[in-house]
Image (tube, rainbow, N blue to C red):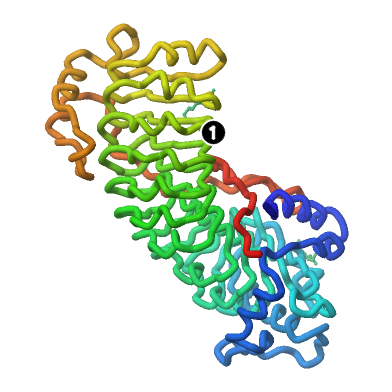
Amino acid sequence: MQTLGFFFYIGLLFILYTSSFSIALTKIQYPVTRRWLTTLRQKDPNPDHVPDELKVEVDPILKFDNPRIKNAYCALHEWKKAMISDPYNMTGNWVGPDVCSYFGVGCVQALDDPRILTVAVVDLNFGDISGQLVPHLGLLTDLGILHLHSNRFCGIIPKTISRLPLLFELDLSNNRFSGLFPTPVLELPSLRFLDIRFNEFEGLLPPALFDKDLDAIIVNNNRFYSHLPKNMGNSPASTLVLSNNKFSGCIPRSFAQMPNIEQVSFSNNRLTGCLPDGLESLKYLLVLDVSKNYFVGTLPRSLESLKTIAKLDFSNNQLTGKVHDSICSLPALWNLTIISNFFDEIGGECEKLSKHKLVLEDADNCISRKSNQRPQKDCLQVLSHPIDCKTAGCQPRDPSILKHIKKKTPQLPTVQVHSPPPPMVTPHSTPKPPPVPQPPPARIFKNLPP
Ligand SMILES: *[C@@H]1O[C@H](CO)[C@@H](O)[C@H](O)[C@H]1NC(C)=O
Ligand SMILES: *[C@@H]1O[C@H](CO)[C@@H](O)[C@H](O)[C@H]1NC(C)=O
């Protein structure tokens, strides 16, 4: 396994912010080979070609190192024109033909021509810049990393972004982008890491997202709704964060086939039905968070085969039945949260959990010998209408059953629509990892093409 971790770049970018940058960045590793690039470029044999609609007049006095640097100059200057506010003056030194010396811009040797330097990284994280992205960004044909976390960019993602054959990390998180899922990103052939959390995207997640070779899919805190695509299991992602949207329907059965999944959060949506069974194949799963939904039925028995699981959060659902010893004694488990469900029994091993510095949070259930539980009549009301997961389908529970139960059942999820305020950091400090990752994205890239 080749690791091309995000943290590696954080390290590089730290150097960027403190000293000479172009030296540090000579270490950038695209997750693509020259041969792969050659294949990609067979479609578009001249990487320097500029389509008419992206042509820009440039002062003839300016002398550029090579045509791609000139294209980058056009892209960055058209973009700068579309910026309305730059409170930290991040683009203040975006002047003149030497784009490699611009703040937040990193150059390395071109993958297909080691004799020339081209723009490989644009990192304006925590810039608090307002404005829009422009189609001319499609001229940055050697861009591998675009980090725009915590800015105020709005509007849509230009279609021309799909012209970036090498882009493998795209972080647009905590901005004000809106509209439907940005489908141009699905056409990025090298993309491995997609983070669009904390924006205002809405509508459906396209099934093609789960057919792409992505290692991280992070879309939490948007306004996505409707059912999750049935082909979810095709995704080789290790991190999938869907929380704080308005997804409805069941978790697709194919979820249990996700070959590399390590961290997954479905939290705070409107998901219904039973939890999927057949989880034996999830060999690397560390975190499973299904909290704050409308799941019903009993826990799937296959949970007991999750030998690597460290954190299970079932809280704030309508789950029933027993929490078995076989779950509580899972070897890596250290935090099991079942608060606010209708479980009526927990195994003896579960009781021991909290004693071994493991955490079991079990309030607001129907466990008769415990004190902090729901009123008996609420429990009777729900437990006298058991749900058979073999036949239950994806319908929510008959609302009349829950009508009189106060407060303990989840309210309609409130979706956070406003991004958290940008952290108060100056551009010259080390970029911090983005806030509120639930769970934190694993930025280790697996499954790279040879
Ligand atoms: C922004 O940065 C540029 C270049 O570093 C500098 O010349 C300019 O005075 C700065 N502007 C403000 C408002 O600080
Ligand atoms: C366990 O997980 C719950 C729910 O995610 C969280 O609220 C709690 O703080 C965690 N406990 C510990 C000790 O980390």
Q: Quadrant of the C terminus?
A: bottom right
What amino acid is labelled 1 in the image? Thr
Q: Is residue 160 above or below residue 152?
A: below
Is residue 251 shown to the viewer in this render?
yes
User: Would residue 376 appear left or right of 352 to someone viewing this image?
Assistant: left
Q: Secondary structure at mark 1?
A: loop
User: Would residue 387 appear left or right of 347 to someone viewing this image?
Assistant: left
User: Would residue 236 appear left or right of 367 to someone viewing this image?
Assistant: right
Name the residue: 71% across, 62% down: 90
> Is residue 253 or residue 433 the one in the foreground?
253
Q: Residue 307 location, x and y as percent?
A: 51, 31
> Is residue 362 or residue 41 the one in the foreground?
41
Q: Is residue 75 above or below residue 91?
A: below
Is residue 438 shown to the viewer in this render?
no
Furthest residue toward left = 400
Q: Is residue 119 above or below residue 18?
A: below
Instruction: Name the image quarter holding residue 392.
Output: top left
Name the residue: 54% across, 24% down: 331
Residue to which mark 1 is pinned: 308
